[in-house]
Image: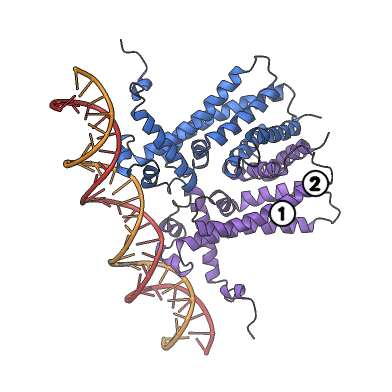
Chain colours: A purple, B blue, C red, D orange
Amino acid sequence: MVSSSALAAVEPPPDGKAEATRARILDAAARALRARGYAGARLADIASEIGMKAGSLYYHFDSREALVEAVMARGLDYVHTTLERRLASLPADTPPPVRLEQAIETHLVGMLTQGDAASASIKLIWQVPPDVRARVLAGHRAYGALWKKLLRDARRAGAIRDDVDLSVVRMAILGALNWAVDWYRPERASPAAIARDISSMVLRGLEAE
Amino acid sequence: MVSSSALAAVEPPPDGKAEATRARILDAAARALRARGYAGARLADIASEIGMKAGSLYYHFDSREALVEAVMARGLDYVHTTLERRLASLPADTPPPVRLEQAIETHLVGMLTQGDAASASIKLIWQVPPDVRARVLAGHRAYGALWKKLLRDARRAGAIRDDVDLSVVRMAILGALNWAVDWYRPERASPAAIARDISSMVLRGLEAE
DNA sequence: CCATTTTTCTAATTGCTGTTAGATTACCGC
DNA sequence: GCGGTAATCTAACAGCAATTAGAAAAATGG
């Protein structure tokens, strides 16, 4: 009996051996992508950062493009599943505004910790070749749907006044959070403190009179 | 009598002839930079978009790097001077929160109209070679100082409560506005409407009780 | 129209970077 | 230790893109 799905077959028995270097490659690639952009992230740089040669990367990835896509998918997936778990862990009767507050903090913390891959997924989406973009965008939409629901629920609960466009609100929040990766400095303010300021500003700002 | 400053000497008599194509090149370059990133914006693409050959660009710019820097400087300068003029045009007794509101709208509209160059200046700052980055960052700081003052004044006027970090607020606002370039679609909401939603959210969100 | 200057093109040159095939080394069970 | 597999390296190839020098073409002024 073959055990599992076609997808699972792609990653053989979760070795742990080669899988570890695969992860290191993804990390290095994420850093390079964030620093230099899509076209600027060179395989030689990525490899040398972890003591390898460019050619060796091809043992782990089919092409540069595949590597980049893996980074982006991973970064987005991390943020997405983290938020889903967080929301699922809240008591069922948690009021929508609190859920929203939690989402803001979770997204921000995810960004600031897994920031390289996550922000690559977001900021480089337009620089990437069309086929990669299409697949990554599908993930973006799924994640965006999560936020849409959060905001709709909050409005239904009366926590968001009726004269603001929820799409605008959603994009404004995510824009503010996503950009934090670029200016965040641990010594100035903690992620929790930043999240507190932003979510208090947003939540009060959206309240009805 | 020589008329003007050393700076003015760099741009000869404002011809209008070659200066026009120079502007077209800058526009095309801005579009390419926004779409493909720093390393991805190829001279051949930029040139062909305005019916030229790559080599011809060197008549107007010393190097690819110089062209990119010109785009970034121009985009930032546009937003900066536009905001300065707007603020200067307000009555002297305009209350600080209103000034802030005007700033939000001005920045957003500037971004959405001159978005290619302006957002290149902001989003590609980390992808660009160090010497270019240093010069462009100087401009960023000057523009940031404008916003710092706006927020400080608003707080002094009692429009911003004391328990939020003004740096965080500033970055959150600019992040929300800057990201709009990526999701704005004219058919969905006007720049003015977007600005209204964001500034009302921010201003109410920052009010003291 | 002619001479001069401005602007653009053509056709190399150069260097860099993704990719690959085959050799080499590290690892692992026996 | 030994055989075999896994992982990495070496040394090329191929294509692309910035840059340049000099030839053409356009514009300009007289």
Mark 2 burial class by Cα count in 10 Å: few <14, some 14-19, many 20+: many
Q: Is residue B34 visible?
A: yes
**Disc 2 designates what residue?**
A154
Quadrant location, the N terminus of chain A = bottom right
Kind of residue at disc 2:
Ala
Is A62 drawn above or below residue B177 in the view shown? below
**Residue B148: x percent and y percent?**
61, 28
For mark 1, give the secondary structure.
Answer: helix
**Residue A66: x percent and y percent?**
50, 63
**Residue A135: x percent and y percent?**
57, 60
Q: Left of D22 or right of it: where is B65?
A: right
**Pointer 1 chain:** A
Is A131 drawn above or below residue B67 in the view shown? below
Q: Left of C13 or right of it: where is A206?
A: right
Q: Which mark is residue A146?
A: 1
Residue found 59% across the figure and 55% down from its top: A137
Residue found 34% across the figure and 35% down from its top: B61
Foreground residue among B71 and A42: B71
Is A54 drawn above or below residue B70 in the view shown? below
Kind of residue at disc 1:
Leu
CA–CA distance in space, label 2 to label 1: 13 Å
* Count of numbered circles in the view: 2
Quadrant location, the C terminus of chain A = top right
Q: Is residue A97 visible?
A: no
Residue found 71% across the figure and 22% down from its top: B156
Q: Which numbered disc flags the more N-terminal residue, 2 or 1?
A: 1
Foreground residue among B44 and A104: B44
Foreground residue among A205 and B162: A205
Task: Examine the image and state in which quarter residue B64 appears.
Answer: top left
Marks 2 & 1 on one chain: yes
Foreground residue among B186 and B121: B186
**Residue B94: x percent and y percent?**
68, 18
